[in-house]
Each structure stands twice: as C-alpha cells, then as structure tokens.
Image (tube, helix red, strand yellow):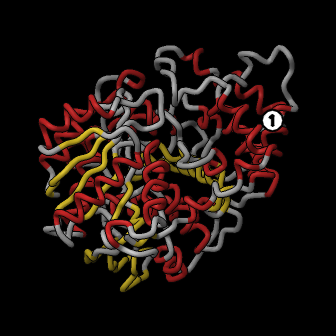
Amino acid sequence: MSSARSSSSSTSAHSKTLPAYAGAEAFLLGQVNYEVKPPPMKTDEEGWHLEAFRRLLECLGNPEQTLPVIHVAGTKGKGSTTRLLVSLLRAAGWKRVGSFTSPHIDEFRERIAVDNEAISPQAFVEALEAVRSVLTENSAGEGFRTTFETLTAMAFWHFHRIGCDAVVLETGLGGRLDTTNVVTARVALVTTIGFDHQKVLGGTLRAIAGEKAGIVKPGTGQALVGFQLPRRRRLVETVVEEQARKTGVPVRFVGRESNPIVRAATHPWGFDLDLDYRGHRLCGVRFPILGQHQLGNLQGVLGALDAFARLEGKDFDPETLRPGLESIQIPGRLERIGTEPDILVDGAHCPASAGAASQALADHFPGRPVVLMLGVLGDKNVRSMLKAFAQGPARIVRCFTWTPPSPRALEGAVLAEWAGKYLGQTRACETAEEAATLALEACRQSGENTLVLATGSIYGIGPARRAFETLAETPNLHGKGPV
C-alpha cells in the first residue's frame, strides 16, 4: 500500500507538543461546545447570544466590520465551496485571503486559515489571548460562552490584524442565528440545501432553507443561490428570493441562465473542463477533485467570485484562474490518501452526501468494487445514509464499522447491525486501526481493482487517515515491503 500524505495530515505533527498551543486547545475544549452537546432550538433566539457576542466584538474594536466577506451557508458543499473560493480569489489577484471553517480534521487551528493554510500555533495562541484579554470576571453569558464563538472572534481578530483583502466565512450551523452572522457580507452564497439538523433548524425543507437564507441581510451586496437538486430547486430559490426581497438585496440564481462549465470529461483523477466565464473560454482545465457535486459547487464559486469582484471594483483575466483550479486540494472530501489499493476518505455525513459519494465512485472508478469503512454520528439519519449507499451505483462488497471519536457517535456494533440489513457482509471493529486493517485485507482478497472508502462523519476523517498512514509505514504489510 502506498500512502499520499496531505497538507492537512501534516499540520498536527508538532503543534500539540507546544505547551502554549496545547493549553489553548484545552481552554477551548473546556467551553460549551455545540458540536458535542445539542445546540439551542431556533425558537430560542436568546440562547444563541448573538447580541452578547456583538458586545464582545465591540471590545475587540469590531474587527469583523473591516473585512470584505463572502458568507457561505448551506447543508452540503460549504467546506468545498470555501476552499475553492480561497484558491480562486488568490489566483485572481487577492492577497491574504482568510477563511473560517468547521469542524476541523486534526486540530483547531485548521479552522482559521489564510490562503488555505492553517495559521501557525503561535498565531493561534496570540488570537486566543487577544480575545481573552477583553473579558471580565462577569463575562459569563456576555458572548464568551462557547467554543465556536471564541474561535469566530479569534478569526475576526486575526484576519483584521494581518490585513486580509478578502475573507470567506462558512456558517457553523444554520445561518440566521449562527455566530458568523454578525457580519454584513459583500456576497451571501447559499449552497445546496437538504435535510440535516432538523431538530434545531426545523423539520421541513422550507424551514431549513429559511434559516440558511438568514445570512442575507440589509446591506448585503449580492445574494446568490448555488446549485440545488432539481426536485428542491424551486422551493429553495423561492425562500431565498423572499428573504432577498424583504431585505432589499439583489439576488442571482447560479446556473439558471447559463452554466459556465461547457464540458466536463470524467477521469480517475478528477475532471478535464472547458469553462466559459466572463466572456473568456478556458479549455482543458485539469480539475483534480472527484464528484459531479463538486461541479455544482464550482458553479456557485464562479458566480460568487464574479459578484464579489464587481462589488469590489476589481477586474481580472479569467485565464489567471487556471492555476487555482488545477492546484486545488480539499482535504477529507473524496480525498485519495493511498494507492495500491486506492483509498479515499470522505466526510459524507447525511443521506445526500452518501448518495453523492456513491455516484462519484461509480463515475470516476466505474465497475470497481468498494470496501466501506464506516463510522457515523448517532444524531444523523443513519438508516437513510445506509439506504443511499445500498441503492447507489457503487458496488459495495464489504463494510467495516467503527465508532468515531465523538460523544455523539453511534456505536460501531449498533451500526453494524443496521448496515448488515442494507449492505450485506458487515463487521464491527473496536478501533479505526482495526477497521482499516480489515478493509485492506478485504481489498487483497477481492482483487486488484477493489478500493476503500472511509466515510460517515467528518470527525472520522483524521483517525481514518492516521490509521491508513500507520499501516502504510508498517514493513511487510500484507506481504509487501516498506513503501
């Protein structure tokens, strides 16, 4: 087995051995964390403490008001969209492009990045100390309550401090009441909407779309609706259009008039594209990302980039985007981390994402059997995810379940019982290492064309990647020498 190390997997090599950084992470882990415990309902507006958070930012000098922001909300595609936007903004000439994303794969500092590189451990510590310095003993409930609020304030402070030319801000949950929604964005982009977090955002697609559309506010320069599934497009567009009309914000619908992607040839490494963008034809662009859904994300990114450039009064030659498109890496999104056999890790965490992953495998690796390494969170629609894998076009021959490192995780043994009903041969494993070892053994037994997909939760990406990398460094694994 050969292993391909990614930039994200190498970021944590030494950070946590630095006492100051380790202390910063420990402090954040000691706060209220809505990624671990249930967040407030959308009806509990006071529970989200947006006004208190604004008061905290005032104490920092309102750094968020100095930043030209593209704000991204949606159910699917937020992380990929954010990373693509940063890459293309850089290629088009913007300097120091900040991004704020969640969750992280290995360590907290990945969430605050500049030019798609996580900030240094030292800068992370300095940002936390800056935020802590404005607190008082009576600050409880005054905007400094949760891990996510603290990280958001740190990001704003850091981006202002280094003078970012542009910032791409990903919402954490929902949009209307999300901590990131203290900004008034140049561009508000709503990516693909689906069913997730229904207990918090509402049980209908209209309710969920309404929460996401809350990032469109008076003063927003442009609202955009990104790619939507055909059966949901009209409803999502209607909800965002209603919000835009109410707030006096112009709205555009990506792909309604024309699609900038005029040709897309599928390959195992990604896509060969021809683009028609801003009156210019880019031919033979090598786009090294897997999955048709990423082409939908790219449509939204190109629309947002065009709108942002016009609002900023900045022009650029579309040909300059080629390096940004051809060099893009998106960790944990159908990311190939190994060959012989091919090993992919993916953060599919909902039925739509599971279906997209299955379709991507069938498109890019047609006819090849798949061994699934699956770990999920218990508060997701797990049965629908299993059904999506079972009914998807990819042929799954074995499944190994495990328990991701989250208090919200579904036990691997329980998942194995459910998965067996949908996917056939399934085995529960104690650890990611055991699941990875058995998955590779199943590949060896199934034949040379079999590949591995480790998926089910973003929280499982880091452990899965590390497990496979450890195995790749093990001499004589399955009869092979050191790689």
Q: Is residue 143 visible?
A: yes
Residue at 48% x, 66% y is 473
Provide residue 404's location: percent of width, then percent of height: 42, 38
Q: Are there few (<14), some (14-19), or many (20+) residues within 10 Å of tag 1? A: some
The residue singled out by tag 1 in the image is 131
Residue at 68% x, 22% y is 145
Residue at 40% x, 51% y is 77
Q: Amino acid at mark 1?
A: Val
Front position in the image: 205 or 293: 293
Image position of 403 with respect to 44: above or below: below
Of all residues, the one furthest to the bottom in this rendering is 283
Image position of 48 with respect to 96: above or below: above
Provide residue 272's location: percent of width, then percent of height: 33, 79
Front position in the image: 161 or 247: 161
Q: Is residue 480 left or right of residue 465?
A: left
Image position of 415 with respect to 391: above or below: above
Q: Is residue 255 left or right of residue 409?
A: left
Q: Quadrant of the C terminus?
A: bottom left
Image label count: 1
Residue at 65% x, 31% y is 29
Image position of 390 with respect to 384: above or below: below
> In terms of secondary structure, where does tag 1 sit?
helix
Q: Is residue 365 left or right of residue 203?
A: left
Q: Quadrant of the N terminus?
A: bottom left
Front position in the image: 312 or 322: 322
Q: Is residue 256 visible?
A: no
Front position in the image: 205 or 9: 9
Provide residue 190's location: percent of width, then percent of height: 43, 46
Provide residue 6's location: percent of width, then percent of height: 52, 65
